[in-house]
Each structure stands twice: as C-alpha cells, then as structure tokens.
Image: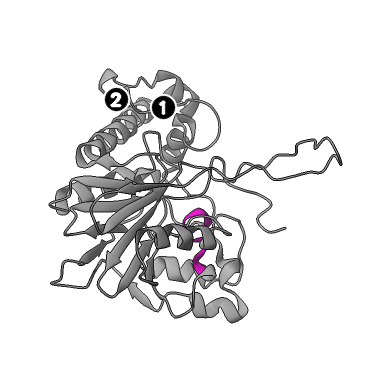
Amino acid sequence: MRRLCLLPLTALALGLVLWTAGLEAVQDPIPPIEVHRITDTLHMLGSGMETGGNIAVLVAESGVVLVDTKNEGYGPTILDLVRQITYKPVTMIINTHVHYDHSGANTEFPDTVQFVAHENIRRHWARTDCQPTPTNCDDFQGENRKYLPKTTFNDRLSLFTGTPDQIDLYYFGRGHTDGDTFVVFKEARTMHVGDMFLGKTLPFIDAENGNGGSAIEFGRTLTKVIDNVRDVDTIINGHWNTLLTWSDLVDYRGFYMDLYDQTRRSLDIGLSPEEAIAAYEKPARYSEFAANKGAGAFTVNSIVNYIYQGI
C-alpha cells in the first residue's frame, strides 16, 4: 500500500466494520463532493478535508480547466461531476501546490491534458527520492513522467489572455510550501488560493519534508497577495466546506500576523517556545478562526516553534 504515513486531517477516513454474515472489513463510503456554483461557467467541487483539496472547474471555450484534483482515486468521480456541469472534455489541469491531496488524481486523466504548475512544483515532482509522503512524486516515475507539467512559470502567467476565460497565475513566495500558486479567474472575480488559506484555522507549514514551507514568510506572502491582486470578491479555499470572500482572506492575514507578532515579542524578551505558546491570546475579532494550542499541525504550537527556529 502506498503512502502509509499520511498528513493529519488530509487522509480519507477508513474504518473496519463488522458485517453480520461474514465479518468482512469494508471501506466506509466516501463523503459526498458538493458542487458550488459561482457563475454559469465556474464551480467549486468541495467536501472539506475528507476527499482532498477543493477543485475549481472552469468551463472555457476550448474545454474544461480544473484547478487541483483531490486525492488519488478521485479521477472518475471528478469526471462524473464535470459531466453534470458540461459536455466539454477536461483539457487543462492547474495545480496550486505539490501535495498529493491536491494532485493525487492528476495521472488519472488523459495525458493529452495540458498540465500547468509553478516551476518549484514540477521540480519536486521530478525528484526520484520520493520520501516523505506529502509530495506524491512517486506518481510521476517511469512512464508517468509524461504527466509532469510542460507549462511552468516563475512569478506570473496569464492563460486565455483577452478572453472571458482569462486565468492569471501568481506566485508571491514561500508559505505553505515553496510553490503556492494563486489562480485568478478574471471574469468571475474569483481566486483559488489552495492551502495558503485552507479554511478558518491555522495553516499547515510544510517545512520538514523538503517542500519549502515557511512560518516566517507565510504572512508576508499573504500580504503580497492582498497588496497586488485586484478585483477579486470570491475565494476558493483549500479545504473549507463553503466559499469564502476577499474580506475573509484579509482577516486571515490579520489573524496569522497577530500570532506572528505575539511570537516575535515573546522571542525578543527571552521567553521559551513553551512560554510563548502559553502567553498567546487570540484577539476577540478573530473569534471565527481556530487557534488550537495542542500538538501537531494546524496549531499555535507548530507555528511558534517554526518561528523560534527561524523557518
């Protein structure tokens, strides 16, 4: 079995149940993937954490553009949902970052699809040493190297320029990983932000798996997005069950930067990481955002320790 060690909160829920006749072990049904209409031509496919990252579906003139493809095994399900929206084929897949819960089904689509990604994403997938597990470069070995993106970019790339289908891709620096891509659907005034805003909780900073995440740069990258991207109202997030708004993104930047600033003050006066975690107080204005002080990812604990380490 592949990927025996899975990231917290991003794995499928698997369980064994007793069947009265044969005591067979069976897999729990997958959570339903909900279709959220944004405009006539743009939709989001999402179901929170359970199935992988949220997908954007753009019905363009030349075919369907997907942003992210959830976990491995979801290709047929995604295609079924696309067919409920349009008869057009999938012709392009853009990935927001390197993690397998956003790109696991890439190789389940025809290799005629145009794959687009930041150059750092392609670099990670092209590795031959595919551990640890968050990077699914094992999917792109051997014959499957044909699925490596042939269209890459550094800072910015525009697709279908000057048409109602225009898509602008931006890279503003390290954060969740070192390839986080912001995908703007210009006509729909909508942006897919991947796991740079996975929902109303603290982020997972992938700083220990060779994927370039940075707790120090995370807030700076969000600030560059807010300062440089214009005319966006709707946010397709990484894993939240519903669509969010531009003001939610601004509040999220403030929530994160407040934690960063409190941590820096604790560090500057000589507190230990443990004391900094204990001293952190979430401001009331960010009451909608979760700030768990427990162990593991998505926590005050992990962010504070990365900042103390200078990561």
The stretch drawn in magenta includes residue 2: no
**Which span is picked out in magenta?**
100-106
Q: Can you say whether 296 is above or below 184 in the image?
A: above
Count neighbours of disc 2 (C-alpha within 10 A) and say few if under 14, some if 14 to 19, many if 20 or more.
some
Location of residue 231 in the rendering, given as x and y in whole percent from the top left corner: 13, 51
The amino acid type, in three-letter code, at marker 1 is Ala
Q: Secondary structure at mark 1?
A: loop
Q: In the figure, 302 relative to 183: above or below?
A: above
Task: Give the residue displayed 28% in from the left and 56% down from the top.
Answer: 42
Judge whether residue 172 can be spotted in this image.
Answer: no
Residue 288, x across and y down, in percent: 33, 25
Q: Which mark is residue 279?
A: none
What is the secondary structure assignment of the residue under circle 2?
Answer: helix
Mark 2 sits on what residue? 286
Task: Give me the residue at 43% from left, 36% from top.
Answer: 303
Are the residues flagged by discs 2 and 1 in contact, CB closer than 8 Å? Answer: yes
Q: On the rendered structure, is 175 left or right of 188? A: right
Q: Position of residue 189 (x, y in %)?
A: 18, 53
Dot 1 corresponds to which residue? 291
Seen from the viewer's position, the closer of residues 141 and 213 is 141
| Residue at 35% across, 25% down | 269
Q: CA distance from mark 2 to mark 1?
A: 10 Å
Callout 1: 10 Å neighbours few (<14), some, many (20+)?
A: many
Task: Give the quadrant of residue 31.
Answer: top right
The quarter of the picture where the N terminus appears is bottom right
Amino acid type at circle 2 is Tyr
Magenta stretch encompasses residue 105: yes
Q: Earlier in the sequence, mark 2 or mark 1?
A: 2
